[in-house]
Image (cartoon, grey):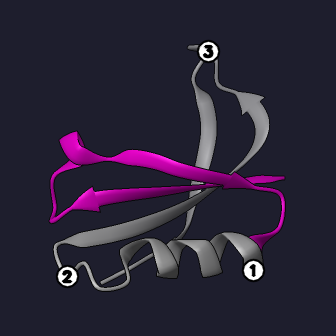
Amino acid sequence: MMYQVYTKKGGSDLTKTQVGEFSDLEEALDFAEKAIEGKPDLKYIVESTSGHFNSYGELLVEVIAESD
């Protein structure tokens, strides 16, 4: 299982940027917290993937954690 860490500004999905990829969930969550530290306009999202795809060829992901 792999974990991707993204940041985004406010509620806009257009600003979603991948900032890291980890094989350990705790490491991903620590990195996510540090990535937005001192930046009140940023939020983080941690997603997991097992490498499987749907019938449209899109990677299947699950949101594990998201900041408020």
Specify few, some or many for label 2: CA neighbours under 10 Å numbering under 14, 14-19, or 20 or more.
few
Q: Which residues lie in the magenta part?
A: 1-25
Q: Looking at the image, is mark 1 or mark 2 earlier in the sequence?
A: 1
Residue located at (37% from left, 83% from top): 37
* Residue annotated with mark 3: 57
Q: In this view, does 7 lie to the left or right of 1?
A: left
Q: Which amino acid does label 2 sit on?
A: Pro
Expressed as whole percent of the image width and height from the top left, the position of residue 17 reads: 38, 45
Residue located farthest toward the front when viewing the structure as drawn? 38
Can residue 24 be found in the magenta stretch? yes
The answer for how far apart the CA atoms under marks 1 and 3 are is: 29 Å
Do the numbered discs 3 and 2 sit on residues whose CB atoms are within 8 Å? no
Q: In which quarter of the image is residue 54?
A: top right
Look at discs 3 and 2 and give the one toward the viewer.
Answer: 2
Location of residue 25 by image quarter = bottom right
Question: To which residue does mark 2 refer?
Answer: 40
- SS at mark 2 in the image: loop
Nearer the observer, 20 or 16: 20
Name the disc covering residue 26, or none.
Answer: 1
